[in-house]
Image (cartoon, rainbow, N blue to C red):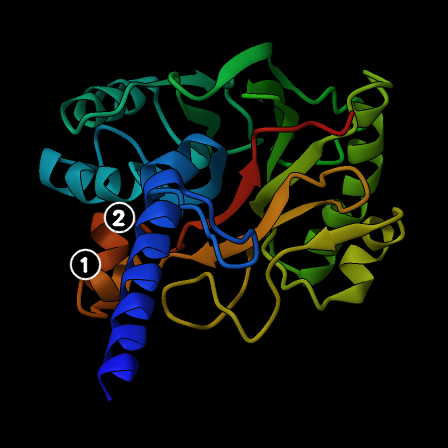
Amino acid sequence: MKKALIIIFVLILLVTGLYFYYTRYKIISPDLYKPEQETNEQTQQKTLKLAVWNIRIFSSDKRDNVELGYICRNLINYDFTALIEVRDENVLRRTENMLSTMGRNYNYLVSGEVGRGVKERYAFLYDQDKVAVTNQGQIYPDKNDDFIREPYFATFRSGNFDFTVIVVHIIWGDKVSERRKEIQKLAEVYERIKNIDPIEKDIILVGDFNREPNDDEAFSALRNIPSMKNLFDLPQKSVIFDTNLYDNIWFQMDHVKEWTGFKGIDKFDETQFANDDKKASLAVSDHRPVWAIFDTTKDDD
């Protein structure tokens, strides 16, 4: 009995000593050892959250500071946002200043006026600590007047990820055929902008297309571009009344391999306005922002 107790005592000492040795010097089986997971902040430093948002009649005349505050509480969640329906540059200055008080350092590119009747502008709002402009914005040279509002594009770099964004606001018009006609021309726009720089293939097309992506008559030309993909499909809705999916992000999967697979539609109308669509539309917009996340640590060009 006494001998058995001695053996047990020795085994306990042996096990305790081995445990101390292995944990003290980190000699742990690779199969068992798992490093600490990255923090959310570390992950954010390696990614770019890119959004597109049609902010209804986005002008200083139409937004007081309270309403602009609602808008900025959404914009601050994105590193880069393509803005649609901008009516004046002053509202962008106010937005930039308000976001700076919230702790982020944004700048913007803004287009000249586009539109045959009511004039609008596009803008790219970006966090200067994460994004740099490599080619200034240009309005697409629409020589045949195919678009009521010509697309706007620019090239950027975030970490090792360089990319060109094209933004468009398709006509509403009186007939669906008018919208389809413009959308059908986007494949030509996409290819022409891609061919400006034969090396740069990371082209991202975003916008308010005023048609849902299952409209094959409208989007067939875009879909015929190899590996072209739209990120959002029905039954998702980007209009706050949950009626339509008009806003989307398109790119060629073979080239934009930096997409992480993460995407979303932010329902600010539900989270900030308790699903009061009228109030949300008047204060902010009748469209929700749609977004996708890209890896900025590598580039495949």
The image shows residue 133, relative to residue 57, as above or below, that is above
Residue nearest the observer in this picture, 177 or 122: 122
First in sequence: mark 1 vs mark 2: 1
Q: Which residue is mark 1?
A: 272
Q: Are marks 1 and 2 in contact (CB under 8 Å)?
A: yes
Quarter of the picture holding the N terminus: bottom left
Q: Position of residue 290 (x, y in %)?
A: 47, 51
Q: Residue at x 24, y 37 (%)?
A: 72
Seen in the picture, residue 17 relative to 38 is either above or below; the reply is: below
* Left or right of 8 on screen, residue 242: right
Residue 161 sits above or below residue 137 on the image: below
* Residues packed near mark 1 inside 10 Å, few (<14), some (14 to 19) or many (20 plus): few
Report helix, strand or loop for mark 2.
loop
Q: Position of residue 97 (x, y in %)?
A: 20, 19
Residue at the outermost left position: 66
Quadrant into which the C terminus falls: top right
Q: Is residue 78 visible?
A: no
Residue 24 left/right relative to 32: left
Give the residue type that dot 1 points to: Gln
Name the disc covering residue 284, or none: 2
Work out whether residue 277 can be spotted.
Answer: yes
User: Looking at the rendering, which quadrant does residue 87 occupy?
Assistant: top left
Residue 251 vs residue 288, the one in the foreground: 251
Q: Nearer the viewer, residue 62 or 21?
A: 21
Q: Nearer the viewer, mark 1 or mark 2?
A: 1
Residue found at x 68% / y 53%: 179
* Amino acid of disc 2: Val
Q: Secondary structure at mark 1?
A: loop
